[in-house]
Amino acid sequence: MPGISSPAFFMSAQIKYYNQFGNAYRQSILSCPEPELWTTDYAEKGRVYNEMKSRIEQQQQLIDNYFSVQWPVLDYGCGFGRQAFILAKKGYEVVGCDSSEVFISIAKELFEKSQFKGEFLVGGIDHLQGRHFSQAVLFDVIEHIPPGKKKELVTQLASVLIHDGVLLMSLPHVKKRLSSQLNNSIRRRITGLFAYFRNREEHPYYIPQQKDILQLFGKQFSLDSFTAADETDYYVFRRKKE
């Protein structure tokens, strides 16, 4: 499910969509025995659940490989706290931010319920009060950012990561088959341009492919590793020296 970074990147209609989603599923999320694996078909262990389970396992592997529990983690676009919950279970101190005040309230309640320590903020970089991090996650976020705002997002992330700081990122994998490429092209040319779709679609925008991501991040980050799975692409970036 979505994790969103900063209200400045969104039209009010998009924030409304995520708040409505959070309100609709709040109790289902809070009552889930595995909130990090919650999906709308969690009870049935359906297709979305199984895709999420696989994605979370791969994200956990990246965390284990690249992060140190002695340092706090910035969860940029934390949503209702899915990945923050995983990090807290592993003993990490987490600072999460998101545009949806409903998602943030759910994350706070999840952490309170599990007696985890975490800080959750409605907003983005401007709410971090000058803090810097050596490790951050951007899991399942960038595909939700309007195309014209993605560069700003990268700049903001670069501003809070120290030299050689690690950024773990994931986003949906666009398959090479014609139907997938056509669907993504429609997002670029039609869906993402109209408020009607932004009000109703979880993924209204064009999903960046590898060449787009490398161009977007290349000025301020170096690529450490890239993995393309069936449903998700995974990137490990390091902050370049100023």
Image: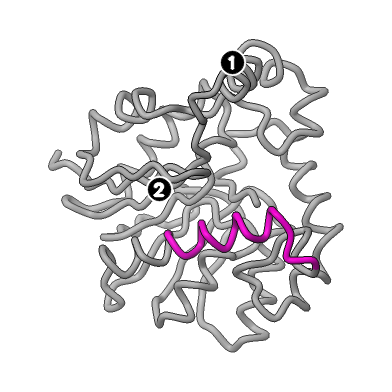
User: Start and end of the magenta stretch?
Assistant: 44-58
Tell me if 47 is positioned left or right of 196 in this view. left
Any mark on residue 185, and which?
Answer: 1
Amino acid type, callout 2:
Met
Amino acid type, callout 1:
Ser
Give the residue at mark 2. 169
Check residue 51 for magenta coloring: yes
Nearest to N terminus: mark 1 or mark 2: 2
**How is this picture coloured?**
one colour
Check residue 77 for magenta coloring: no
- Where is residue 60 drawn, in percent x and y? 41, 66
Q: Nearer the viewer, mark 1 or mark 2?
A: 1
Q: What residue occupies the far front of the structure in this picture?
A: 177
- Where is residue 228 drawn, in percent x and y? 39, 41
When asked about the image quadrant of residue 122, the answer is bottom right
Measured along the vertical axis of the image, is residue 127 above or below residue 179? below
Residue at image x 52%, y 64%?
A: 83
Tell me if 62 is positioned left or right of 48 in this view. left
